[in-house]
Amino acid sequence: MYMPAKEKEVKIPFRNIPELFRWRAEETPSKPAYSYKSNNTWIDVTWSEFFVKAKCVASALVELGVKRQDRVVIYSYNRLEWILADVGAMLAGGISVPIYHSLPWNQGSYIVNDSDTVVAFVENPVIIEEIKKSRNQVPLLAKVISLSDEVKEDDFVIKFSTLEKIGKENLSKNESKIAENIEATKLDDLATFVYTSGTTGVPKGVMQTHLNHLSTVEMLYSFRDFVFEDDVVLLFLPLAHSFARAIEYLHPRAGVKIAIAESIEKVVDNLSEVRPTIFPSVPRVFEKVYAKVKSDVEVSPVKKKIFDWALRVGSEVGKLKIRKEKIPWSLSVQYALAHKLVFSKLHKRLGGRIRYFVSGGAPLPKDIAEFFWSAGLLILEGYGLTETTPAISINALDDFKFGTVGKPLKWVEVKIAQDGEILARGPNIAKGYWKKPKETEEVFKPDGWFHTGDIGEFDEDGFLRITDRKKDLIKTAGGKYVAPQPIENSIKTKSPLISQVVVIGDMKPYCVALITLNKDEVLKWAETRHLPSDYSKIIESDELKAEIQKAIDEVNATLAPFETVKKFRIVPDDFSIEDGLLTPTLKVRRRQIMQKYESIINSMYNM
């Protein structure tokens, strides 16, 4: 099926990203642009203050010798300095290159070398020491700017505060150069290299242009009621990921405030402090909230009965809202009571002001989207890749369908190939992979179509549904194709005890699964059943295995025989970013998981 672009003419009101930031600083100079936490206090930075700081960074980079199209690495978690480095690098005429803060230096060094980086902003003092010890391995890297005050300065490393001082002292001299860079940078010029997270091999540097980003900004900005100037966005998604970068560049267009979360671990606290109206996230966070809520009500039969009633009432109201039908008075009264007794607690935990969530990066289980909607909280799921900068489609506030990733954006064409692969074409499609012509030719075609590697379909209303990754499809020994992700997502929603599920079965006689657990929930569950408190013994217990089997049986009942999970094994430790089994955006690394647990997998096939 082919879905043409809704509009053919692409109109971008800015020639590049720095001009967009300059425009916003001139439009609303005294409005808060960013908020960050320091010494237990949230501090606002206005648009005018931010842009002056960004120009100081640019001025300093010019003094350090950064020239047009030079690469500047940002190796850090989210913080104000991250965004200053990004915008400052572009104002200096450079190309920013983000690196996930969680990547060890042996992987970060590959990106620094591959991108031919000349200057790097680095947060972690340990990594800075590693860079210093291996300077001969990164010959083009001339200067490291430390975002930490814990390092000593030398001829190679300076602190960010020193950089700002250099920039401020030379700003009057470099102001004209910065203005020239804004004038000279064209829409088709490269803005940033974003390296794929490398779930299947060596990371590839995706070359994204100013047009790629600004076209996405304009397409999202055109949605009715999507963003208002008084909105507050809590940002915890790593800015090294394209999803977060789309938010970074949309926010000056809309004039909203971004509150920069302290860390992934502090997100729940920050939600109640910042009280955002918009919260972009990944499915893993929604899954954890869902599991926690379900677990909390399981402790008491009375609580569970009230919760199930509230959920039924919320579901009825939600269906009527989607159909835009009037809600009967009696149902409205019940819903108000359900909100007071049950849903208000969830709203409060999430800050109490959420207009909507945005989910991306991986498929969101339909059950979870429907649960939040029943509770009066809307999750708008979207779809895209780093190579599509990053959006292809998204559900809109007035046009959404759970279980889908919405309709294509207005300047994006989408078609489904004969084998089910999703192809996309539009101004948001990146230029290709840096220094990798062969890999570029494989997916970026001369006629403009990008081959996503995802399998999908359009429904009768034009909503796009993703069924799986093409490379993740399982072909059993019997020749049957199985899409593992929908099965994994279903199993996860059946029990709060389950954290992650990986279904395996390629070229095998049947499908099996590796299961990781939510340790706190398991301990709580064991206590109510008077099982031993030793976690290692609990996970070996027949009672726990029977509980997990119940969840699998419930899902198996909905599947074709060849899709069913015949056996499973519990893995003692949850997958994590630190052990290399999750990407920085919390997606599972299947290849690494299968390598690490090869013997356990083989045992399920009696090999």
Image (cartoon, rainbow, N blue to C red):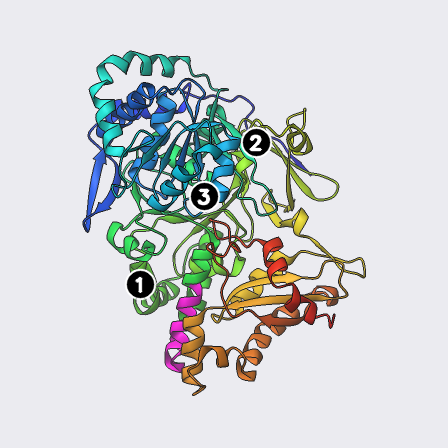
Residue 51, position in %: x, y? 27, 26
Disc with the residue nearer the chain's start (2 vs 1) = 1
- Whether residue 240 is situated above or below residue 274 in the rendered picture: above
Q: Residues within 10 Å of mark 1 (few under 14, many from 20)?
A: some
The type of residue carrying mark 1 is Ser
The type of residue carrying mark 2 is Val
The local secondary structure at tag 2 comes to loop
Q: State the count of labels.
A: 3
Residue 270, position in %: x, y? 28, 53
Query: What residue does disc 3 label?
Result: 105
Residue sitting nearer the eye, 258 or 11? 258
Residue 218 magenta-drawn? no
The prevailing secondary structure element of the residues shown in magenta is helix
Query: What residue does disc 1 label?
Result: 344
User: Viewer-nearest of labels 3 and 1?
Assistant: 3
User: Viewer-nearest of labels 2 and 1?
Assistant: 2
Q: Which residue appears at 22% of the width and 14% of the height?
A: 172
Q: Quadrant of the C terminus?
A: bottom right
Q: Residues within 10 Å of mark 3 (few under 14, many from 20)?
A: some
Q: CA distance from mark 2 to mark 3?
A: 37 Å
Residue sitting nearer the eye, 80 or 254? 80
Q: Quadrant of the N terminus?
A: top right
**Region in magenta:** 290-306
3 and 1 marks in contact (CB < 8 Å): no
Residue 450, position in %: x, y? 63, 33
Query: What residue does disc 2 label?
Result: 412
The local secondary structure at tag 3 comes to helix
Task: Determine the image quadrant of residue 418.
Answer: top right
The local secondary structure at tag 1 comes to helix
Residue sitting nearer the eye, 349 or 510? 510
Q: Would residue 287 be found to the left or right of residue 306 on screen? A: right
Q: CA distance from mark 2 to mark 1?
A: 39 Å
